[in-house]
Image (cartoon, grey):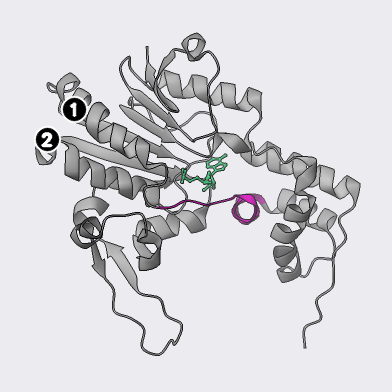
Amino acid sequence: MNTIVSLDLSEKEFSSIKQLVFDVTGICLGESKRELVKRRFAPRIRALGLGSYSDYVKYVQENGELEVSNFCNAITTNLTSFFRENHHFEFLASEVLPKIAVRNLTSRRLRVWSAGCSTGQEPYCLAIKLRESFPGLEKWDARILATDLDDNCLRTGRSGEYALEGFDRTPEKIVQKYFQALPLDVNDNFAKPMVKAKEEIRKLITFNKLNLMQQPWPMKGKFDVIMCRNVFIYFDKPTQAKLLARFAALQEPGSYLFLGHSEVVQDPHTIGYKLVEKTTYQRL
Ligand SMILES: C[S@@+](CC[C@H](N)C(=O)[O-])C[C@H]1O[C@@H](n2cnc3c(N)ncnc32)[C@H](O)[C@@H]1O
């Protein structure tokens, strides 16, 4: 029988974990996150047969990229849902896409980036809105880049498979049009009905691993739309400011940036944006 040894987290260990999280992910953990740190890392420490949080910090530092990924996956918060903050998708359909359709008529190129896409609900909603609201989309070179730091999230996004119960805010006809039901596992009494995104939305999206802290980003082209929602809240002000400047460098005047509901930019003009809708900014 496995005995679960309770792991104590000393003040010094908490500080070194917070520092490592910050150095690797940019996520700034406050003093109140002590229990979260214990909850998130203890299973990994036990699985590795290590005896303490300081042993684990050393292990991450000595084992390079492989353990850094597990470390990041453990600390990120991946809460998301289909059509979360739906006013953004409404604004995208009614205002943003018609304007881009005119602006980019010559190039017929459309680039959207979902930065911090978690398990993919956000980029799939973007793809649905493009299909539903972008005139003549099939004649355009339209692509959505979906990035996150967490490999487990990206795996779900790439699979396009979701529990049907997660579509409570999605109109029934949209679910039927863009998702197909997967066969229910008859051997599993607790199996939930699952659906899979259809090819017509899947093919618009590319899921890639990207740590927003990494320098430089590999993308060279400009984005007409950047959606980076509910990611900034984990970063401190200087990190947020640096990221905003990097987003601005990837957007031409007239392009749009969507942030999460609590991620309000003070004085957006100073960083090259203007507020056009709730937490929605247009590049100047
Ligand atoms: C709360 S989710 C937001 C998901 C989605 N944008 C939404 O609003 O529903 C935050 C996501 O940001 C990602 N994240 C946190 N730090 C990151 C970093 N440094 N680079 C890339 N992604 C990061 C997490 O892995 C997580 O999936």
Q: Mark 2: which secondary structure?
A: loop
Taking the image as drawn, is residue 44 in sight?
yes
Magenta stretch bounds: 64-81
Image quadrant occupied by the N terminus: bottom right
Task: Specify the amino acid type for callout 2.
Answer: Pro
Query: Which residue sits at x=32%, y=47%?
Result: 125
Residue 275 picture location, percent across and down? 42, 18
Residue behind mark 1? 98
Query: Which residue sits at x=12%, y=35%?
Result: 135
- Identify whether 268 is placed above or below 65: above
Image quadrant occupied by the C terminus: top left
Residue 18 picture location, percent across and down? 76, 43
Q: Mark 1: which secondary structure?
A: helix
Assess whether mark 1 and mark 2 are in contact (beta carbons under 8 angstroms).
yes
Query: Which residue sits at x=74%, y=53%?
Result: 37
Magenta residue check for 171: no
**Within 10 angstroms of label 2, few (less than 14), some, or many (20 or more) residues?**
few
- Does label 2 or label 1 sit earlier along the sequence? 1
- Identify whether 81 is placed above or below 274: below
